[in-house]
Each structure stands twice: as structure tokens, then as C-alpha cells.
Image (cartoon, rainbow, N blue to C red):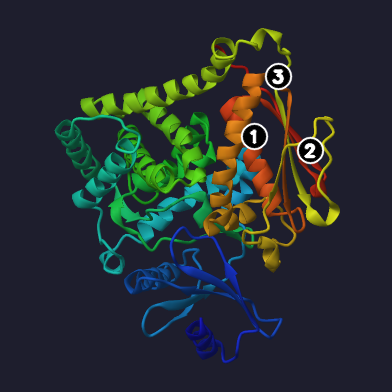
């Protein structure tokens, strides 16, 4: 960190007033917002990386983008050893943040949100084509061009980090043959350009009402379809098929200004890239979720499998018979698992509990609170007493940092901070285990009320995040009605009972 201060001093001729640690990256890079002592001088972002080659790739690609007047952050300087650099501060608001309302409505995006998505789809071909030159590809790291080895790496990631961890049996040789056929087809498409690689809404920053693009250090020469698949089939974005089709046409109209393409042929190849990207994502979710036991990634698996189901139905797997068989097995396993989970609790009531007939027919209702310890623990209005009170104050507090002070645990920048820090995720993993057992047992015994409460210093960030996530977890897993009260935020919400057939 001292070396980063010296780098700032070298380029701005002053000592920084303050260096505020930031989150926002899935890598091991450290980010700091560096404030000047002169209030009229804009803050900058200082980065401490772990890979000299990756840092230099980002820095040099930034310069190449800027030379072409493409909207990326300016870079001010890089250390001699390549381990630290300074870049423009684009603020904290990403396109992902701007699309929050549409996601919360299950993918029902309004006209203003669609306009933002359309703008980005129009600009993507410009990024891909204006950066498409040997001089740019020579800057790329670790590869200059997408090749068979890189595709097979991602497909094997899916095989070993998802299929193996999900205990899905497969014939190694048959699956490998289909992987090789898919890789061959992916590389034979005609439309090549600068492949951004991690093109998603979180990597589009909204600065001065315009989109700016970040995190392209893994870019390389490759089929442009990959970036389109990455963006429109991002599992968390919940884009509808109709919106995807509309945005693919917007993208192709823009791409045709640079290179003439056959729309039908492009869309057929796009389906293969969606298949490839979905398998790659499942591999990542498998490793982060099933292996590292991070609940956020476990919860993301069903959305990715839903994408897999959709792309199978569009015929993306028809040429790869055994891969289709395995993909269908994944979908069927997920469906069977959900059905078994949904049915088991009701069956246990009938088959395992002889006193069931004497119990009330009223369903269990779970009430979950967030609160500030300064204002006391919430009362149990059911009259039963008991329940759980969890203290979140052992975890990293976003409220210590100025940019989060006016936000809550429901806001995406705070969510990103907490999840990337990881302490709250581990904390909730333990809460989920305890809560699952208790909800299950209360349903077996016919109880009608259960209370959970999460407290932190101000009842604004960690407790709100924890209460909301436990509520959604219980509602999704058990189908029971959940009442949420973020007391200090004066927010009340009900997650309705989900009817389940036996």
C-alpha cells in the first residue's frame, strides 16, 4: 500500500488525503479509492494486482481503447514492476445496479431499462471491431487468440467441477468426443473480433449517464458471439427470451455496420456459444458453490440450469448426442431434486408423525427481522416466545466506508461488498443449516410460528442483508409464507406461501 501511495505521489505530486478500500472484483486484486487533499481534484482508483502480466495487459489495452476513443477508464500510470496502477474513478454505479428494478420484477424491464441494454448492445460491436487488430492482440494475456486448448479447459472445468461434484455419471470418452466436436464448430465461425471475455452488466459502469467498460484484461481475438452469449444469458439478469431476441437483432444491426453477416447463420452459431458459456458457468458455480460451499453460487445453479434447458430446446445440442443426454440428465436431476425437496416435508407429516391428525391445519409462518442493537431486540408478537437472534457484528461492516453509508443491505453495491468480502456468506452458511433443521422440525410438528432476527450496529447493512437472504432461502426451499421486517428501514415485505403438490 505504501508503494501505491508513492505511485500516486509520482503522478499527482501530492500525498493522498485518504485511501478507501473497495470491493467489486472477483479476483485477488485490491482496489482503493484515493482522495486528493484538494477537494477540486477528482478521486482516482488505485489497484494492487497479483499478476504483473495481467496488470500490464489491462493497462496497455486501456491505452489501446482510449486511442480509438472508446469509453473505458483513463489510466494515469503503472509502477515499474507492473504490480500497481492508477486509473480513472468511474463511481460505484454499474449497469447491473441500474437494472435492479427489472430483475426484482422477474425480468420485466421497463422502457428506460431496455434503452440502456439496447445502447450497450449497439456499442458492443464497435468495441469488438475497432479493437480487432494484430497490434491489440499482441497486448493480450494469457492468450492472443481463443483456441482449442482454451475451449477444452472450460469444458473440462464443467466436467470435473460440476458433473463430478453433482455425482452425475458419464462416459468419459463419449463426452470428450462431443466436447471436441463442439470446440471445432465454435472455432469455425467467420465473425472474429476482439473478444471481451467477461462482458456482463456488472462490468459496465454508468458514468456521467454513459456506459463505460471495465475488466477486459482477459480479452483476446475470438468469435464475437461469445460476448453476446455472456451478456444476454447471464443467469442473474433474468432476461426473457423475447428481450434476448430483440437485443440480438439490435446487436446484429450494429455489427452489420462493420462486417456483413447472415443473421440466421449467426443465430444458429450463437446457440452453440450459449451452450458453451452455460457449461462454463456451471463449472464455475460448481467449484465456488459445491466445492467451496459458497451459498450465493449454490443458489445461482438453478438459473444456469434453466438456461441450459432453454438452449437444449432450441436445438443447440442436436449435433452432440451424448452431450445432449448428459445435459438432459442435469435438467432432470435438478427437477427431481426440487420435486423431492418440495414433497418430502409433506410426506413426512403424513407418514412419519403419528400425531399429525391431531395437529392444526394452519401452515407455518416464519417472521424475520433486521434491527439495530441500539434500539433493542424486536418483540415476538406471536406470544410464543423463543426463536433465534443472530449477531452480525462479527462480520465486516460496509457502514465504515463513506460510499455505503446511505445504502442498505438491499442495495447491490452493499451486496457486492459483503459477498466479495465473504465473511457474511460463511456466517449465513451456518445460519442456513440451523434454520433448515428448525423449519423442517416445526413443519413436522405442525407449529405455526417461527421467528428469526438479525442485529447489527445500525440495522442497515449486515442485518438487512442477512434477514433478506434467509427469508428468500426459507421461502424458496420450504414454500412457507415468510414475513420480513427491516425495522430500522421501515420496510415490510411478505413472501407468499408457495403451493406444493404431494
Residue 404 horizontal/vertical position (percent): 69, 61
Report the residue at 30% width, 34% height from top.
Answer: 265
Q: Earlier in the sequence, mark 2 or mark 3?
A: 3
**Residue 164 vs residue 211, the one in the foreground:** 164
Q: Looking at the image, is mark 2 or mark 3 nearer the viewer? A: 3
Write down the residue under mark 3. 363
Write down the residue under mark 2. 492
Which mark identifies residue 232? none
**Residue 76 vs residue 495, the one in the foreground:** 495
Q: Earlier in the sequence, mark 3 or mark 1?
A: 1
Q: CA distance from mark 3 to mark 1?
A: 26 Å
Q: Secondary structure at mark 1?
A: loop
How crowded pointer 2 is (Cα within 10 Å; few <14, some 14-19, many 20+) is rated as few
Q: In this view of the protein, can residue 387 be seen by the observer? A: yes
Report the residue at 65% width, 84% height from top.
Answer: 17
How crowded pointer 1 is (Cα within 10 Å; few <14, some 14-19, many 20+) is rated as few
Q: CA distance from mark 2 to mark 1?
A: 17 Å
Q: CA distance from mark 2 to mark 3?
A: 20 Å
**Quick check: marks 3 and 1 in contact, CB under 8 Å?**
no
- Relative to 128, is 429 above or below? above
Q: Quadrant of residue 274?
A: top left
Left or right of 156 in this view: 12? right
Q: Secondary structure at mark 3?
A: loop
Q: In this view of the protein, can residue 498 be seen by the observer? A: no
Write down the residue under mark 1. 105
Q: Quadrant of residue 155?
A: top left
Amino acid at each position: 500500500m505504501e508503494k501505491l501511495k508513492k505511485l500516486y505521489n509520482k503522478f499527482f505530486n501530492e500525498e493522498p488525503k485518504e485511501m478507501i478500500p473497495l470491493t467489486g472484483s472477483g479476483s485477488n486484486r485490491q482496489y482503493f479509492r484515493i482522495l486528493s487533499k484538494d477537494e477540486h481534484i477528482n478521486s482516482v482508483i488505485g489497484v494492487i494486482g497479483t499478476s504483473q502480466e495481467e496488470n500490464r495487459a489491462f493497462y496497455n489495452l486501456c491505452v489501446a481503447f482510449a486511442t480509438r476513443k472508446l469509453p473505458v477508464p483513463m489510466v494515469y500510470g503503472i509502477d515499474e514492476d507492473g504490480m500497481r496502477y492508477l486509473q480513472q474513478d468511474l463511481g460505484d454505479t454499474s449497469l447491473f445496479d441500474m437494472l435492479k428494478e427489472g430483475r426484482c420484477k422477474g425480468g420485466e424491464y421497463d422502457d428506460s431499462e431496455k434503452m440502456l441494454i439496447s445502447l450497450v448492445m449497439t456499442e458492443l460491436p464497435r468495441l469488438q471491431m475497432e479493437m480487432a487488430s494484430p497490434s491489440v492482440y499482441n497486448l493480450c494475456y494469457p492468450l492472443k487468440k481463443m483456441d482449442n486448448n482454451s475451449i477444452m479447459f472450460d469444458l473440462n472445468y464443467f466436467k470435473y467441477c460440476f458433473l463430478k461434484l453433482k455425482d452425475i455419471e458419464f462416459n468419459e470418452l463419449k463426452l470428450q468426443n462431443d466436447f471436441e466436436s463442439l470446440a471445432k464448430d465454435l472455432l469455425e465461425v467467420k465473425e472474429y473480433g476482439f473478444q471481451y471475455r467477461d462482458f456482463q452488466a456488472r462490468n459496465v459502469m454508468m458514468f456521467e449517464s454513459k456506459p463505460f467498460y471495465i475488466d477486459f484484461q482477459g480479452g483476446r481475438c475470438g468469435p464475437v458471439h461469445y460476448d453476446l452469449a455472456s451478456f444476454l444469458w447471464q443467469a442473474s439478469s433474468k432476461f426473457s427470451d423475447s428481450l434476448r431476441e430483440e437485443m440480438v437483432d439490435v446487436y446484429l444491426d450494429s455489427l452489420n455496420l462493420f462486417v456483413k453477416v447472415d443473421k440466421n447463420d449467426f443465430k444458429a452459431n450463437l446457440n452453440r456459444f450459449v451452450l458453451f458459456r452455460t457449461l462454463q458457468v456451471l463449472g464455475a458455480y460448481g467449484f465456488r458453490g459445491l466445492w467451496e460451499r459458497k451459498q450465493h453460487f449454490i443458489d445461482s445453479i438453478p438459473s444456469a440450469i434453466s438456461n441450459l434447458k432453454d438452449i437444449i430446446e432450441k436445438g443447440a445440442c442436436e449435433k452432440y448426442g451424448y452431450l445432449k443426454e448428459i445435459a438432459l440428465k442435469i435438467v432432470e436431476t435438478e427437477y427431481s431434486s426440487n420435486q423431492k425437496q418440495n414433497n418430502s416435508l409433506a410426506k413426512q407429516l403424513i407418514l412419519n408423525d403419528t400425531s399429525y391428525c391431531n395437529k392444526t391445519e394452519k401452515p407455518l409462518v416464519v417472521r424475520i427481522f433486521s434491527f439495530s442493537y441500539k434500539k433493542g431486540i424486536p418483540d415476538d408478537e406471536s406470544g410464543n416466545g423463543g426463536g433465534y437472534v443472530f449477531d452480525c457484528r462479527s462480520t465486516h461492516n460496509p457502514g465504515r466506508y463513506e460510499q455505503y453509508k446511505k445504502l442498505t443491505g438491499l442495495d447491490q453495491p452493499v451486496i457486492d461488498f459483503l459477498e466479495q468480502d465473504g465473511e457474511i456468506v460463511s456466517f449465513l452458511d451456518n445460519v442456513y443449516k440451523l434454520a433448515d433443521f428448525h423449519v423442517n422440525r416445526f413443519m413436522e410438528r405442525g407449529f405455526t410460528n417461527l421467528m428469526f432476527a438479525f442485529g447489527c450496529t445500525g440495522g442497515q447493512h449486515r442485518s438487512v442483508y442477512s434477514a433478506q437472504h434467509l427469508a428468500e432461502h426459507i421461502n424458496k426451499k420450504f414454500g412457507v409464507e415468510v414475513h420480513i421486517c427491516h425495522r430500522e428501514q421501515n420496510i415490510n415485505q411478505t413472501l407468499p406461501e408457495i403451493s406444493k403438490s404431494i
